[in-house]
Image (cartoon, rainbow, N blue to C red):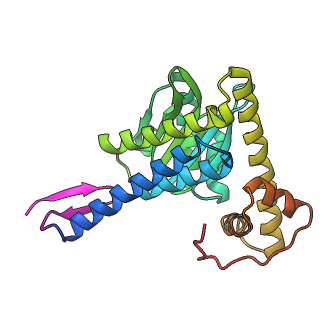
């Protein structure tokens, strides 16, 4: 009997109903769902911030990574945090640092993937980022460009708590997810001209700022951490069929609602 590495698990190859094959089917279904969800945004209206948040969550589920964050460039070409698989303060700080120092910035500038399998040994490439990453518990990083043809609009950062690299297959999956998300943004509502696309990106960045403010309001109001506060905002938006930015605006303007338990995964 042989074994094979599948995402985070090393599974034994066996008969068609073995855990190995069940895991393969589950992962294939998750991949199908992920791409279906992303391509669905090419038709009709959608919430850019929510879509990108779901992208980071899909990356953590599908790839051998422990956290994911997404950076988009604003009109001045500066990278700004757009979405993350966790809203914990240390994760957001890691994203913010990459505007001046980090794999995301190198990835955005070169248009190619950037890998560091061991930040302890190779941290000299980005001293500030490496120090903050290790403080947050991460020791390896992979950055993938948000790219469509020759246009780069940002970078997807994937973080691991154990040293090592993603497999070739995982890199292909991560890059494919990033590419489809990029196309969704650039072609939202038929925005094909450069100037219109830039305006769309700026609108998305402004929405992200609004959501961060609302998350902070909820965290203070309910005496919770930023992650739980963001979860409650997601639940509130979905149960009322609102965009995250609309829910955030409501919170900032005084809307009150009960915060769901920390283990609520309805998002």
Q: Position of residue 175 (x, y in %)?
A: 44, 38
Spot the residue most to the right: 253
State the image coordinates of residue 134 (x, y, percent, origin top left): 52, 51
Residue at position x 30%, y 40% from top?
Answer: 168
Residue at (48% x, 54% y) in the render: 58
Decide which of 101, 57 is in the foreground and name it. Answer: 57
Q: Nearer the viewer, residue 99 or 62?
A: 62
- Quarter of the picture containing the C terminus is bottom right
User: Residue extending furthest left?
Assistant: 1
Residue drawn at 51 percent across, 22 percent down: 110
Residue 49 in the magenta stretch? The answer is no
Does the rendering let one see residue 102? no
Viewer-proximal residue among 81 and 99: 81
Q: Is residue 14 in the magenta section?
A: yes
Q: Which range is magenta? A: 1-15
Q: Residue 106's image quarter?
A: top right
Identify the image quadrant of residue 11.
bottom left
């Amino acid at each position: 009997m042989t074994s094979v590495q599948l995402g985070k698990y090393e599974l034994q190859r066996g008969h068609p109903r073995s855990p190995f094959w069940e895991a393969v089917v589950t992962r294939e279904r998750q991949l199908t769902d992920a791409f279906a969800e992303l391509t669905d945004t090419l038709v009709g209206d959608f919430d850019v911030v929510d879509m990108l948040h779901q992208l980071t969550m899909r990356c953590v589920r599908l790839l051998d990574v422990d956290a994911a964050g997404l950076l988009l460039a604003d009109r001045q070409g500066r990278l700004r945090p757009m979405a993350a698989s966790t809203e914990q303060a240390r994760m957001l700080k890691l994203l913010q640092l990459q505007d001046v120092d980090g794999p995301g910035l190198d990835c955005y500038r070169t248009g190619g993937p950037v890998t560091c399998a061991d930040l302890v040994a190779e941290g000299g490439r980005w001293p500030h980022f490496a120090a903050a990453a290790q403080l947050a518990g991460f020791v390896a990083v992979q950055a993938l460009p948000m790219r469509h043809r020759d246009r780069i609009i940002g970078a997807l950062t994937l973080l691991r708590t154990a040293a090592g690299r993603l497999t070739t297959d995982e890199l292909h999956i991560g890059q494919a997810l990033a590419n489809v998300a990029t196309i969704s943004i650039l072609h939202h509502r038929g925005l094909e001209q450069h100037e219109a696309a830039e305006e769309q990106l700026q609108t998305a960045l402004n929405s992200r700022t609004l959501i961060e403010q609302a998350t902070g309001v909820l965290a203070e109001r309910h005496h919770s951490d930023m992650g739980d506060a963001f979860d409650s905002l997601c639940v509130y938006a979905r149960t009322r069929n609102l965009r995250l930015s609309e829910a955030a605006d409501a919170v900032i303007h005084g809307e009150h609602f009960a915060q769901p338990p920390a283990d609520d995964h309805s998002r």
